[in-house]
Every structure is written in C-alpha cells, then in structure tokens.
Image (cartoon, rainbow, N blue to C red):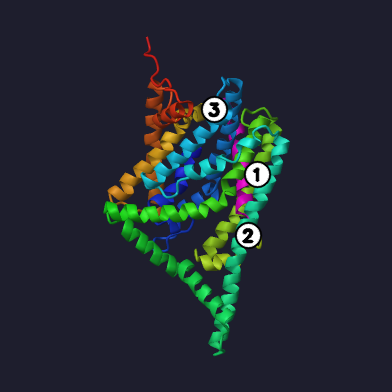
C-alpha cells in the first residue's frame, strides 16, 4: 500500500512541473475533477505515504538486524548492514541519474540509514529520546525557514512603502527590498507560472540531451537541499523501530489501544491538514500569501507523525478482520517486490512522460488515472512474477550483493 500510495504524490512531479506537486496549476480548471484530485492527494496522502514508507524501513531494519544476529556466522551484522545500505545509495543514484527521477528517496534513505545502526539495541521507551530530538530539530528547522520567509516579506514591504513615499532607502533597506522582490518573483503565481512554462518546454522537447541535462541539474539542487533535512526520514525510521519492538505491526496490542491511536492520530493529523489545505485554496495557491498566513510554528512534521501512525493503526485493525485480510493479501506480491515496483514506476514515467512527450499535457485528475493504470499493471506483474520466483529482480540482485553470494531465484517446478 505504501509503494502504491507514494506514486499518487510522485506522479504529480513526474508528469507535470514540480511546482504544482502540492499546489494546483492555475492554468488548468481548479474545480470539478481537478479539485477533487487535489483534495484527495493533499488531504489524505501528501507526506503520509512517504512517512509510511520511511516508518516501514525503520521496522525492516530491526527485523533484518535481529535475524542477522541470530544467524551470525562470523561476518557480523554491521558488515552486512552497511554493505546493504551502500548498495541502496547506489540504487538511489541510479534512479536519479539514469531513470531520471529527481524526486528519488532511496539515496536519502541510504544516507539517513547510515546513522541508525547504533540505536538498534534501544528499547521502545529509550527510542523516544532520539525520536523527540529529531522531531524537535525538524520542526525547529522548518519553523526557522518559515520565519525567514515571513521576515523577508515584512521587511521588504516596509522598504517598498518607504520607496513609495519617495524616501531614500538605506543600504540595508535596499537590500531588504531586493530580497523581497526576488522572493515574490520566484514564489508568486506569476513567477511560478513562468518557471513551470520553462520546465515544461525543456521536458517536452523529446531531445534526450536537453532532458538529461535539465534533470541532472535538478538532481544536484534537490540532493543539496534535502541532505540538510534528513530529519524527514530519521524520525520515522526511529518510530518504525520502536513500534516494531513494541509488537505494533504484529497486532500484539489490545484492540482498544489501536482504536485510541487511530482516532487520535487520524483526527489530529487530518485536522491540522484541513487548515493547511484551506489556507492554500483560499490564497488561490499564492505561496507569498500562504507564508503570510502561516502559523508561527511549522506543523508539517507533527501532522505527518500523527497521520501516519493513525493510518497504520487503522490498517492493523482492518487486517485483524478476516474479510479485509483477504483483500490486503492481494497486495502481498506487490510488497515482496516493493523495490522493483518503485524503480519500475520511475522507468514507466520516463518512457511515458519524456519518451512519448506526454509531460505537462495531462490535467491533475488524468495523472491519477495514469496512477491507477500503473497500479493494475504492477499488481498483475507482481502476482505472475512471484508465482515463479522467490524475489523481485532488484530484490534478488540487492540481496545477492549484500551477502556476496548468489541467492536462489526460481522456485522449483510444481509436480
């Protein structure tokens, strides 16, 4: 569900300018199917699917390390673990620079995962310490960026008012005005529209050299910015580790506990998100106005934590029901090939949007139709593949290189 859900948001940057990832394209209708598509993505999925992916990665890390320590034959869990993570970083670079997905998360997962090995022995209660530290750091970092933007607007408008009254500006005031004008030029609806037009022109060119050069530039920018925001992944890694040790994923807690977590998590998460998307819509997706109206403390990371843990509690409760369990089991082959399917989504997007020139030509709701088609394709492919093989192709290669030994691949023929 996580690997399918994350495509809902990724495709908003794969098939149209990234500027409209979480905002509506004002050049298209902002009502009807497009509005409902945006409400679905921004209200229920944005940030939550990435958070779920990250949380499961943290849980999977503990599952792997506990198994390695039980079966250690002299190589040591650290040797296997760090080789596995370095290979993951390589897969992320491949996804970014070869499959041309500048929003790849595997590279950042790998960089973040290098830091969590020393915390593997901590109890759920002890893991609350790194969870709290990383969460506070992430909220503080995001709030500082927000305050900086708000200060740019405030000081810039003060300088603009002085200039309008024909008063001579000091060097500092002129600098404030220049910074403000640059901010508005970049983030206003008009500035975003111009940047989107430029991006669309580059990626619709169907000229391989132009497309590769442009996306590689985005890769460099994205990696440099995101590397300073590893708290986005780390907080969920630690939460996933704690929940796994707590028995959360295996349904060991009382149903009443899951119900409380679900109601509180989903209620607070969606409540915070309601105010966010309302401000975005009422501001007509003008980022400058959105920044002005923002709360003094950034709530993005807090919202995601509540929303993701709440969602997972709902899923555990549903999975305890035999009827829903049968439905979920249909997704099991997709989960066993999660890494293959994630990279396959990038390949499909590269062929469809860049190779076939579809980039920027679909409306928002139509991108969700493409998402549904990819789901069907990957679902069928995963079921067929897993009937004959133990692993997905990427999982097999990753596992073989991790253990430095060729792993079994094809299942024995049925009698």
Q: Earlier in the sequence, mark 2 or mark 3?
A: 2
Q: Are the residues tagged 2 and 3 within 8 Å (C-beta)?
A: no
Is disc 3 placed on a helix, strand or loop?
A: helix
Residue 344 picture location, percent across and down: 38, 38
Q: Are the residues tagged 1 and 3 within 8 Å (C-beta)?
A: no
Q: Are the residues tagged 2 and 1 within 8 Å (C-beta)?
A: no
Residue 136 relative to residue 96: left or right: right
**Is residue 383 among the parts visible in the rendering?**
yes
Q: Residue at x 28, y 51 (%)?
A: 208
Is disc 2 placed on a helix, strand or loop?
A: helix
Q: Quadrant of residue 19?
A: bottom left
Q: Quadrant of residue 25?
A: bottom left
Front label number (2 vs 1): 2
Distance between the alpha carbons at the discs numbered 2 and 3: 41 Å
Q: Residue at x 46, y 36 (%)?
A: 87
Numbered circle sitting on residue 325: 3
Is disc 1 placed on a helix, strand or loop?
A: helix
SS majority, magenta: helix
Residue 354 relative to residue 397: left or right: left
The residue at which mark 2 appears reads as 143
Numbered circle sitting on residue 299: none
Numbered circle sitting on residue 265: 1
Residue 392 picture location, percent across and down: 41, 29
Is residue 107 on the magenta stretch?
Answer: no
- Viewport quadrant of the C terminus: top left
Q: Residue furthest front?
A: 74
Residues drawn in magenta: 298-323
Crowding at label 2, few (<14), some or many (≥20) Cα neighbours within 10 Å? Answer: some
């Amino acid at each position: 569900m996580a690997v399918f859900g994350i495509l809902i948001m990724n495709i908003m940057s794969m098939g149209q300018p990234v500027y409209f990832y979480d905002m509506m394209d004002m050049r298209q209708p902002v009502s009807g199917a497009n509005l409902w598509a945006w409400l679905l993505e921004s209200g229920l999925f944005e940030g939550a699917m990435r958070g779920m992916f990250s949380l499961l990665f943290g849980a999977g890390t503990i599952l792997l390390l506990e198994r390695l320590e039980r079966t250690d034959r002299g190589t040591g869990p650290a040797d296997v673990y760090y080789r596995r993570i370095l290979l993951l970083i390589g897969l992320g670079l491949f996804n970014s620079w070869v499959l041309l997905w500048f929003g790849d998360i595997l590279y950042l997962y790998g960089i973040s995962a290098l830091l969590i090995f020393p915390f593997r022995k901590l109890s759920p209660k002890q893991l609350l310490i790194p969870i709290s530290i990383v969460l506070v750091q992430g909220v503080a970092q995001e709030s500082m960026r927000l305050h900086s933007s708000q200060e740019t607007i405030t000081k810039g408008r003060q300088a603009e008012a002085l200039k309008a009254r024909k008063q001579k500006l000091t060097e500092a005031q002129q600098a404030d005005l220049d910074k403000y004008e640059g901010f508005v030029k970049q983030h206003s609806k008009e500035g975003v529209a111009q940047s989107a037009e430029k991006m669309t022109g580059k990626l619709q060119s169907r000229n391989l050299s132009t497309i590769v050069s442009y996306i590689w530039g985005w890769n460099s920018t994205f990696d440099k910015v995101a590397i300073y925001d590893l708290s986005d992944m780390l907080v969920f890694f630690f939460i996933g580790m704690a929940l796994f040790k707590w028995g959360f994923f295996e349904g060991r807690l009382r149903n009443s506990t899951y119900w409380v977590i679900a109601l509180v998590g989903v209620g607070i998460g969606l409540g915070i998100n309601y105010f966010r998307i309302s401000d975005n819509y009422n501001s007509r997706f003008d980022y400058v106005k959105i920044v002005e109206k923002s709360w003094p403390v950034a709530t993005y990371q807090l919202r995601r934590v509540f929303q993701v843990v709440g969602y997972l509690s709902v899923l555990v409760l549903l999975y305890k029901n035999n009827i829903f369990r049968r439905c979920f089991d249909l997704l099991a082959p997709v989960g066993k090939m999660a890494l293959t399917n994630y990279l396959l989504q990038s390949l499909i997007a590269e062929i469809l949007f860049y190779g076939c020139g579809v980039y920027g030509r679909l409306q928002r709701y139509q991108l969700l139709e493409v998402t549904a088609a990819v789901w069907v394709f990957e679902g069928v492919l995963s079921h067929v593949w897993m009937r004959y093989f133990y692993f997905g192709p990427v999982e097999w290669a990753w596992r073989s290189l991790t253990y430095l030994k060729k792993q079994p691949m094809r299942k024995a023929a049925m009698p």
